[in-house]
Image: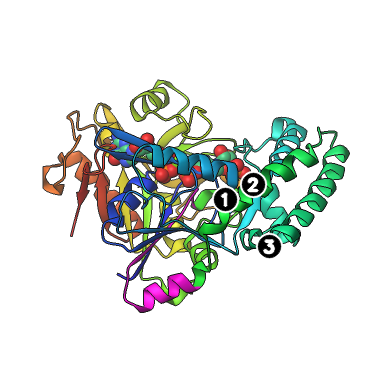
Amino acid sequence: MAVTVVVGTQWGDEGKAKVIDLLAASHAIVARYQGGHNAGHTVVIGDQKYALQLTPSGVFYDTVTPVIGNGVVVDLPTLFAEIDSLESRGISTDRLKVSSLAHLIFPWHQAIDAALEAGRGEAKIGTTLKGIGPAYVDKVRRSGIRVGEVMHLGAFEEKLRARAIAANIELADMGATPVDVDAVVKNFVQLAQRLAPYVADTVNLLHDARERGEAILLEGAQATFLDVDHGTYPYVTSSNPVSGGAAVGSGLGPRHIDRVVGIAKAYTTRVGMGPFPSELTNELGDALVEIGREFGTVTGRRRRTGWLDTVMLRHATRVNSLTDIALTKLDVLDTFDEVKVCVAYRINGEVVRQYPDTVERLAEVEPVYETLPGWKSSTEGITSFDALPESARALVAIVERETGIPVSMVGTGPSRDAMVVRS
Ligand code: GDP
Ligand code: IMO
Ligand code: MG
């Protein structure tokens, strides 16, 4: 498979990075295509755990070129902190390329994000406060500053100062604290100089690699139901994590994408606000948090938890044209007496199998469950499908029946090799 997209099928944190790390061994390039440092991608190699926010999860292989694609919004302080941290742990970041077309995040984006959230009161989204939404607003209203502009430092500095002054007017209007223009300009001119060696025409780089027959992995951040178009708007992020976004955010056209792997947890989690039909607000939900260690990688927030929802997975299969699914964190369910799977919704007494098109309707649905007996035995580290307990295999079968596509991988632990890979 020449070009593969890895995409989240729920509300994020499905274990995308672990799957990318596993697949990266047979790929020449791993490229992020949207989002920014709102992502928290965990890779566990032996006794070492790495939490990445911007660096593509293929960085651990010296055979892989990690690429930050044009669709990403880049926070330079985070990028360099991550590079320094990886280097200090013996991971080389020399091959990293950052698209000249990607947009930069500045401190005023974070200040605006915080002011907007404060203004929403009860209706807040629960963003990561990383400035992601405001940075994409600047991109779309054509006042953003792009990575390639750091190659012309004089013009970059001038534009940076003008943008900082304009942002302060906006912040004052919102009743928020302005940024220190001189300090921001000084800091970002230095960061711009440090960025210069990484800047590349990644669109042509990806096409050249593909034409040479090299395999490319496109790494999604966030997920289908956080997508600004297809997610639970307004409780979403400001980019397109769906596979169509991988074409836009990398510059590889839709016909160049050969495989789309959807990552789904064997249950469901969500950080931040918004509807969640299969949510468990009882002790079972607490058990999922405890056993699954469901605390945000980036913000440390407790994730909301619930049963697996195949109505969502069916919709994710459609909008991403998924070819196969990786079902992760199966081992987290090992001790449960029973395991439920939502297979339909009940709305006003009517049973529907189709995902509703408005967040208001979604908020009204009642999940219809299929219940499996718990397998009550450890699946940790299992790598063969036949070695999984019968009830766990039945769970996989429900996912395949409801989505109509194969489950190609099953996660049985955080580490790189704790995975059933079915050929
Ligand atoms: P991502 O944002 O989709 O890359 O996922 P995160 O890294 O935010 O969250 C997934 C968490 O689950 C991380 O702590 C992973 O180490 C862990 N994880 C991934 N796959 C498995 C699995 O199969 N079993 C268990 N127990 N943990 C897993
Ligand atoms: P990964 O890539 C889970 C959520 C936030 C909030 C909403 C909007 O690790 O799966 P934003 O800061 O993007 O404007 O916040 O989206 N969110 C995530 N939730 N995993 C993520 O990334 C997320 N990135 C953003 O919690 O509800
Ligand atoms: Mg995450």
Measuring from the top left, give residue 398's x and y in whole percent: 29, 49
- The residue where tag 2 is placed is 190
Question: Vertical placement of 373 versus 386: above or below?
Answer: above
Residues under numbered marks 2 and 1 in contact, where contact means CB atoms less than 8 Å apart: yes
Badge 3 amino acid = His
Q: Residue at x 62, y 63 (%)?
A: 148
**According to the image, label 1 marks what residue?**
194
| Quarter of the rendered image showing ligand 1 | top left
Q: Residue at x 65, y 38 (%)?
A: 125
- Dividing the picture into quarters, in which one does residue 26 lie? bottom left
Mark closer to the chain start, 2 or 3 = 3
Residue 222 located within the stretch drawn in magenta: yes
> How busy is the neighbourhood of tag 2: few (under 14 within 10 Å), some, or many (20 plus)?
few
Residue at x 36% of width, y 37% of height: 89
Relative height, residue 112 to residue 241 (above, below): above
Question: Which residue of the protein is positioned furthest toward the bottom in this rendering?
Answer: 211
Label 3 sits on a secondary structure element that is loop
Position of 386 with respect to 267 (left or right) is left
User: Which residue sits furthest left?
Assistant: 387
Q: Type of residue at label 2?
A: Gln
Can residue 358 be seen here? The reply is no
Q: Is residue 155 above or below residue 43?
A: below
Magenta-colored span: 204-223
The residue to which callout 3 is attached is 152
